[in-house]
Image (cartoon, grey):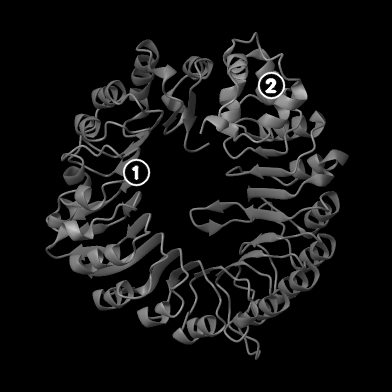
Amino acid sequence: MSNLLPPTDDVETLLRPTDGVEALPSDCWRLVFENLSQDDLEAVSLTCKDFLTNSNLVKKSLNVIHPKVTMLSQHLKRFPQLKILNLSGFRGDLDEAMSEIACSGISLEGLELYKRYISISGVIDLGSNPKMKNLKTLIVTDITCLDDEDVVEIANLFPNLEELQIIGFELHGVWVNYPKRPFAGDSGIEYLASKLKLLRKIHFTDQYIISDRSIIALSVNCVFLKDVTISNHRVTEHGIGLLLQNRPNLEDLSLSHIRSSTSNITIENSISHAKALTSLICFRTEIPDTFLMEIAKAKLRLKVLQLNNCCSFTASGLLMVSSYLNELEIDRHFGILDAEMEILAKGDLGNLTHIQLKGCKMTSSTFLLLLTNCPWLVEIKMIESKVRGEVDDILLCKNHSIRNIDLNCRCKFSEALVKQFTLLFPNLNDLVLGWCHTFEGIHVAELILTGDEINSLEVLRVSNSSGIDGEAIAKSCPKLRSLEISDCKKVTIEGIKHIVETIKTLTCLNIDNFGSEYYGELLDWIISAGFVDSLKTIFVPSKECFNEEQRDEFLRRGCFLLTEWY
């Protein structure tokens, strides 16, 4: 062992205090910093001025949250090597921001604009900058309109695109097209397919006026295509079948509202061609067991299978493709009964890490059987599901791997089972409790959050609970990092203050529990009591909940004051 230690003189040299970072040239420090994560890079930048300068030159991605474009301008100058810009949380003038980016001189590889009611013109203006020719990823949602001319221009301006997602504006679940001109059609997509030779990922929504022509053009021209999402009632099984046959390297496929056709080419008799397929997501689609059998016969190693509002499949069919699955999501159109869940739970689910069940009815014994037979399960999500019955041998079913549990939207559980949750899941890290009750009408949150401390819990989201208050949350969850509360009648402003005072680890707070007139007092208290220095992000329902002075003071102290809707 002594041979592994450096000589004494070398140890003294290593331990000798140094003045700054002059021992290494800047180029060496940059090589070191390039291997750090973004969080580590931020921490290093606070060490000294030289580290700040060098870290600025290697920062590659930036999430833009500050609403003032002047701040964005400063960031673009500070980080000249930026490659990825995410404006999904940006609340300011987007057109002005896009103009600032176009004039900045940076050469972007990825741009994401999310949840903004915008036109495509700003993106096209950005593409007029020759340095944007290297853009590889473009994600834009809530676009007001996108015609064939726009698609042609995007294809010409960004010839190196590998990922393209342009999604139209959606209002209350209904696609809305305006101004009064149609969305892009086959002509635009066929041109795009002929130009974007490097395309790997594309997303089509129902707004696109496309047919099988577009899908076939992509399958023939885009040889690197690996990830396709199609939610369009004009596309048929014939087009999807040819996509599967022409692109055997396809890895991820998501389908919704696909129509049947009179063609002999179907998804079922073409799925065997997709030898690289690892993820299959279907929505409102008929999935017979014969289709799952074709996947099994082709020995496709599916790792993700999501069947949302689908029909015709059975538990036996699912077991044909279950052995490699890491993620399984089941939402059968007419529900899932206990007998089928028991068959599934007894099957080969040994690799499963995530499961989501909707409309499921099972006994506590089947639920516990599922936990026992899935030793690597990390996350359980249940929606509109029911678990009833007594529990036996609860300690034998303890699952140490489960970190995340999401119980939402009209779930019901036996009271005996809920009372054992902290024993069942000793390493629970993330808990979501929505409109979820016992069969006796007690909210699940009231039972879980008034019992023993859950020391492992770091993220809690609780809503629609009439029986839980701030004191109970603070007592049962002493190590929370993130807390979201909405529509919990007993949680008062004083209760929120108690939570903030008591839970020293809290950095993110999301409150949608009061009228807008009550938030000003709470925010002033957070500032005056000094807790703004430990909190990093606070979400409130609307801009009416705070004034400009409060927002600026929070920003000055390093805390973002944000709204969910903008």
Residue 235 screen position, x and y as percent: 64, 74
Tell me: residue 225, above or below residue 532: below
Tell me: residue 132, above or below residue 287: above
Q: Which mark is residue 384?
A: none
The quadrant where residue 490 appears: top left
Residue 451 screen position, x and y as percent: 15, 40
The answer to whether residue 58 is visible is no
Residue type indicated by callout 2: Thr
Residue type indicated by callout 1: Asn
Q: CA distance from mark 1 to mark 2?
A: 38 Å
Number of disc labels = 2
Residue 219 screen position, x and y as percent: 74, 72
Tell me: residue 143, above or below residue 243: above
Label 1: which secondary element: loop
User: Could you say which is closer to the camera, residue 63 or residue 429?
Assistant: 429
Location of mark 1 (residue): 429
The quadrant where residue 492 appears: top left
Residue that appears at 22% across and 45% down: 445
Label 2: which secondary element: helix
- For the residue carrying disc 2, how many other residues have a C-alpha within 10 Å: few (<14), some (14-19), or many (20+)? few
Residue that appears at 20% across and 53% down: 437
Q: Which mark is residue 70?
A: 2
